[in-house]
Structure formats: structure tokens, C-alpha cells
Image: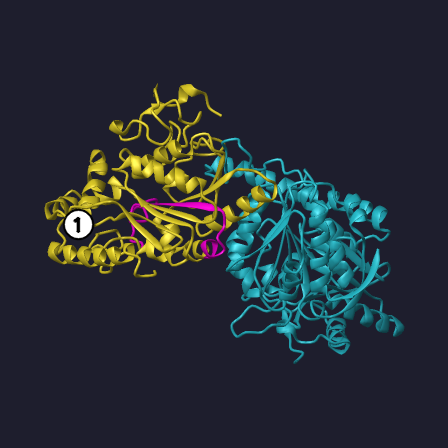
Amino acid sequence: MSSREDGPARGPCAAPGTCEPLLAGMAGTACDRDAPLLRAGNTNCGGCGMSITLNMLSRAIGARRVQLAIPACCGIVTAGPFPYSAYGAPVVAATFASAAAVATGLARVAQMNGEDTRVLCFAGDGGTYDIGMATLSAAAERDEDILYVCYDNEIYGNTGGQRSSATPLGARTSTTPAGKAQAKKDILAILAAHRVPYVASVSLAHPDDAVAKFARALDLRGFRFVHVLAPCPTGWKSEPAEGIRLVRLAVRSGLYPVCQIEEGRRWTVDVEPDFDRDALAEYFAGQGRFRGDRLDLGAVAGQIQEQWQELRRRCAGGVRT
Amino acid sequence: MSLEFVSANHAAAMAAALAGRANERARGFGGGVYPITPQTECIEWLCQQEFARGEIVRVESEHSAMAVCMGMALAGARTFTASSSNGLAYMTENVFAAALYRLPIVMMAVNRTLGPPWNIWVDHGDTLLLRDSGWVQFYCEDNQEVFDSILLAYRLAEDRRVLLPVLVCQDAFVLSHTMMQTDVPDLETVRRFLPDLDLPHRLGDRPVTVGGLDFPHETEAHRRQHAEAMARVPEVYRECQDRFAAVFGRRPADAVECYRMDDAEVAFLSMATTASTVRAVVDAARGRGVKLGAVRLRMFRPFPEAALRSALAGCRRLGILDRDISLGLGGVLWAEARACAPAGCVVQNYMVGLGGGDVRPRDVDGMLQDLLARDAAGEPRLVEVGS
């Protein structure tokens, strides 16, 4: 374990899981881990949403014993070269499609030996929506005791920004130079359809909600899935300092619903959007990947409206996913 | 010790279960499993077992079967899986990963033809595809050898000087679905042979990244360590044979097994069940005064070059029988073994029994006549034996 000096400066802590909301949950406090989950010296870009995700996750993990399976993605590159590790917890660098299966092995052996280790997968959208989908679906179907966190930057970031099935409609990537012609997968509905104990989306602009949901997901048993919209300044062609603002705009406009689904049936919206059209316009204007594209804001707003009608029906309990 | 009448699939499963139970006082046992003909009965048998500290995970693919084994092994458990043919091809990425993590996983492979077109019968091309994966490879000739090799594989794989995964191969249907009398020891005896697994790089609470990033100089060092571990296998294997003989009262075959080779001028080199047929032909040819011998390669990786060289030292003509074809080259065994023949020896490759064609004594006899008539080796020959 690294010494406390490695971590950020510490302040008093009001209550576990609700620390320092004014500092967006990121200030060091007495309830932090001895070693932060992502330590200093990592190779992430400035403004990386994955870094912020790990810091919030670190806060939620607190003193819990964890092991992580991380597939090919920026999240494993940031660990750094052998024999160093930027992670303040034990990590298996899994093959691209295998995080959920490697985590299955870790979790089963921990369980059969009576250990309280919480096993996590930490994967990007490529490893989740695309190549790891069958493995993820199978682990969810088996209800493995795993918390799967997907940090979704909506591209293959590690390879330089190619489209994935999480890339949104209209986004330009190196393999969709004219903008992607298809909408992104509805990953929450896919996971909810597995009837797993817990599925949630969190917003990096709403750290209280995010840390509380991470903490809840850590303590539940069975398969849990948390989705995070993770700004990637390199891929989104956005300002590194603007990531949190972009996420807030995505939440306000209704583009990124912040919700949770218990047992695949009980849907709850955690942050109410105001469906502001200016927020939506600002979200797209702040990212070079949408620039120059003939993005029809009216059509996107229409899609958001449809998506929310569906979501409201689900929240009302009338629709099984 | 009890005598059981079982198929090689069940023999492998029984050995794996015994090895697993022998580790239940340590970190336990497990593996990910997925069905594929003709291996399925092995994993079915395992799935019918109860383990005090063990979990068989029914996964969605061979790729994940090996990934579950990797996760379990990294957590310190003894692990097992089984596969075959296209399943092994699909698993390949994680087969390599298991070796590169230096995990002592044991896998049973039923050799089956790669498709399409689909063919469920024996061909060694599937496991030879994995020859460069960093796994130790054994090819077996009967059900007892399959059983013994699984137990032996764990002791070898888990030795601190080795720490490599081991593949135990057997021929589709010829062994996998053929019942044979097999000696099955009791758990206490197996415990005397297999110490608890204590993986030095087990993932615990220390914040390390297993299998992270390497720069070239680190990969050079890691490959060197891997190669050195492979190079230690023959010596550790001999120790395992000795210990096996002391505990179970029978000695598993050497890496290279010779039959009537002492004065042999002509010899056939083969692997797995083909070797049984060859031995019958040797006896018949000896009756006719032909100084024929047979060599069976049991350990394909690490390739036992020195032992093979010594076995073939007196040989003037050598036929190498491959149940595989490396398209554009010839037989894989031939390509690797031909350099072990002495200078001046005529080395002819026969690829025979591809796709599971039944290699009969008369087929081997035909190749013997061909070999005896040769003054020089020709191109690798694909010998068709029909169904």
C-alpha cells in the first residue's frame, strides 16, 4: 500500500458517502482509502472522465477489500508499465472480451474461501457494448457476484477514436468520418432485461448520487452494473476543463438519463432533466465530433422525448423490460 | 485404488476431480466449462460432482471457459477445463494468455478435426495449432495414460520451477468414447502425490497489476523466464515420474517412448493411438526379418530434442507419421522432428488418418514398403486410408 502522502490533502468528513459535495466529491477526506484507486503518476489525459470515475469509485470503495478485472482499454494502459501499477488495488489485466469471466473466477474463489473481497470489472464501452457483450451477458445471466462498471466515452479511445456501438448518432470518429449513421445501444435496458439485482447510470456532474450509487452497488450481492458517461477530450474534441459541464448538459437535456433499475423491474429516475433545448445545443456545440455535421437538433429532441416516454412508462411499473 | 471401466473422457474428469479435491484444504478447485463433441462427457461428469470447496462454472463459450480458469487460478484455486477442435481455436487468445500469466491450469483436449466442413473424428491439427502458446503438451495412447497424465500434469504445472499450464491430449472416439479398464486411486493417495497449490503470484490485497504493460526489454525478460521454465520441464517431469511411481506403483511413460529400437535400422515416429498400430506392424515386420522399431512422442512441448536424437541415433530410414497437415509445408511432427534424425538417414513424411480415417496395420505396412524402397526422401506424402 502506498503511504497517505500519495493521496490528496485531507479534510474532515461529514458522513460516509456524502463527503464534500461542494468540491464535487473529489476532495480528500478522512474516509478515503489509504491508497486511492487511481494513484498519482498515471498516464490518463487531462480531463479524462475515466479518471474522475475512478476517483468517485475510490471514495465509494473506502475500506472495502476489492479486486479488479480490467480488459484492454485506456483503463489498463493507465496502470503503467511492469512492474509499476497506478492502481491502489489489485488488478488483473484481462483479455479484451474476458473481464466478466475473469472476474467470475476471482469472485467464485473468494466466495468459496469465505473472503469478503468485492470483485469489480472496470471496462470501456468497446469492452462492454461490443467485444465483451457475450461474456457480460453470460455473467449477468449467471448472476455472478460482480460489480461491473462501464466507463463509456462512446469510442475506442485507446486505439485513437474509432466508432463502437456506444457511439451516438451523428458523431464523427476515425471510422465514421461523415458521422455515425446509427444510434447507440440502450445498454441499461439490455442489462435490465437480465433481471440482475442492480443496474444504474451515474453522472459525473452529480457526485453525491454517483458515490452513493457506487457504494450501494458495491454492497449488494449478485450481478450489478453501473454505467458512466465519461467525457474523452481527445475523442470528443472538447476542452479538458469542460467535461463535467458537458455531462451536466447531457443530463439536463434528457440525453443521458440518470436512473436505476432494481431486479430488472423497478425503474427510478434519480436526476430530473429540464429538457432544455439550449442545453442540448450547447452539449453538441461543445464537442468537435459533432461539428460540421448536419445534426438535426429537432430530431434529436424528438428522440429524447420518445426515450423519456418509454422511461416514464417503465418507472410507472407498467412495462417489464 | 479401484479398477473402473471408463471412457477416456470420464477418466480425465475423474482425475481432475481427485486433483481438485486434493486441494480443498487449500484454495479449492474449479473451472469454466463449455460443451463440444467429443469432449462433452468429460465436463458433464464434472458438473455432476459435489465439491466441498469447488465450483464448476457453466459459461457461454470456450473463450470464457479459459478466462474463468484464469480468474480462479489467479485467486489461487486449482483449475481444469476441457475442449476440442474449433472450441480450442475459439479459445486460443486465452490459451496464450493463461501461459503468459504463468498459471498452472490443466486442460484436457480431445483431438478432433477442425472444420468446416464439420468432422468430429480425430486429427491433431487442433492442439498443434497451440504448439507456440507456451503450454506443455502431452499426447496419450490409452485411458490409463490420460488419467495418469492429468494427475502428473498438476504436479508438473504447479512446481515452482515450472508454473506453466499443461495440455493433455487424447484421440477423439478412439479413446474419448472407448471404455477401458482404468486404475483409479483414492483421494488420500492422490493427496500424497499432489501437494496443496500455493501460487506465488496469487492475487491478494497487494496493489499490483497482473498482466499489465511491458516495454520491449521487459518482454525480453519475461520471454526468457518463460523459455527457461519450459527448459526445466524435462528434468521436473522425470522427478514427477519417479514420485508417481513411488506413490501409485506404476511409472508414466517417458517423453519419448521407444519400442524395439535397440537394433532398429528402420523406424516409425508417431504420436497418440497411431503408435499402438505401429507397434503391431513392428512385431509383424520383425517376424519377417525387417529391423523395424517404433518411437512414440508423448511430450510435444517442450520438444524433447535430445531424447529423440538419442532414440533415432541408429536409424537409417525413418517414417514420420503425422495425423495433421500444415498446409503449405507438410506434417507438423515431421517438420519439427526431421532434424533429430542422424546424418544420412532417409526421412519420409506420411500424413495419414487425417479427419479420423482409421489407420490400419495394412496402411502402416504400405508405408513401410514405400520407405524400404526409397533411396532418398520425397515430398511429404498424404496417404488416404478412407473411412
Residue B207 horizontal side relative to residue A265, left or right: right
Quadrant in which the N terminus of chain B appears: bottom right
- Mark 1 sits on what residue? A290
Question: Would residue B271 be seen by someone viewing this image from the given angle?
Answer: no
Q: Is residue A47 magenta?
A: no
| Residue located farthest toward the bottom when viewing the structure as drawn | B386
| Nearest to the observer: residue A183 or residue B376 | A183
Q: Position of residue A193 (x, y in %)?
A: 38, 59
Q: Which residues are magenta?
A: A138-164
Quadrant location of residue A122? top left
Q: Is residue A142 magenta?
A: yes
Badge 1 sits on which subunit? A
| Nearest to the observer: residue B27 or residue B268 | B27
Q: Position of residue B156 (x, y in %)?
A: 71, 45
The residue lying at 46 percent from left, 48 percent from top is A99
Quadrant in which the C terminus of chain B appears: bottom right
| Residue type of the residue flagged with mark 1 | Phe
| Nearest to the observer: residue A62 or residue B364 | A62
Q: Position of residue B329 (x, y in %)?
A: 57, 64
Residue A35 horizontal side relative to residue B355, left or right: left
Above or below, comparing residue A4 to residue A87 in the picture: above
Q: How is the image coloured?
A: by chain
Mark 1 crowdedness (10 Å alpha carbons): few <14, some 14-19, many ≥20: many
Question: Would residue A53 be seen by someone viewing this image from the given angle?
Answer: yes
- Give SS at disc 1: helix
The residue lying at 32 percent from left, 38 percent from top is A210
Residue A231 horizontal side relative to residue B263, left or right: left
Q: What colour has chain B?
A: cyan
Q: What colour has chain A?
A: yellow
Q: Position of residue A63 (x, y in %)?
A: 46, 30
Residue A206 horizontal side relative to residue B352, left or right: left
